[in-house]
Amino acid sequence: MKLRLARRAFPDAVVVAVEGELDLFTAPFLRDEIREAIKQDSNRLVLDLGGLSFMDSSGLSVLIEAWRLATGEGGGVSLAAPQAPVARILRTTGLDRRIKVYSDVDSAISGEI
């Protein structure tokens, strides 16, 4: 598989680490993981993108869906440590203005910039 996911629950948030490539074929796996994480662990989701090397429009759709789901539950989504190619997509699409992007997971959990 081109995508690896790992979930860790913290007192104030749940972190889903995303590693590999997020595309049309792997996006459903992340979508399912996000739904479970929000439902079972916390409505405050941090996506650790430090290991994500590629993301296409399918991945963007998953991020938008995650934001809608979490905010609908009274929580939110933060993105942590995106690599340059992924950060560029977030900037180009303007998604970084909707979903906060942090330099690392700890900052995303605490909400500090």
Image (cartoon, helix red, strand yellow):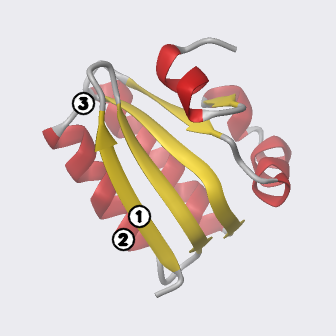
Residue under pointer 3: 42
Q: Amino acid at mark 1?
A: Leu
Examine the image and state in which quarter residue 57 appears.
bottom right
Residue 88 drawn at (x, y percent): 85, 51
Residue at 59%, 72% (x, y): give it. Answer: 20
Residue 9 drawn at (x, y percent): 27, 36
Q: Residue at the left extreme?
A: 40
Q: Is residue 34 above or below residue 112?
A: below
Asked if disc 1 and disc 3 are in contact, CB closer than 8 Å, the reply is no
Circle nearer the viewer, 2 or 1: 1
Asked if disc 2 and disc 1 are in contact, CB closer than 8 Å, the reply is yes
Q: Name which of mark 1 and mark 3 comes first in the sequence.
A: 1
Residue 43 drawn at (x, y percent): 28, 29
Residue under pointer 1: 5
Residue under pointer 2: 29
Q: How many marks?
A: 3
Q: Amino acid at mark 2?
A: Phe
Q: Amino acid at mark 3?
A: Ser
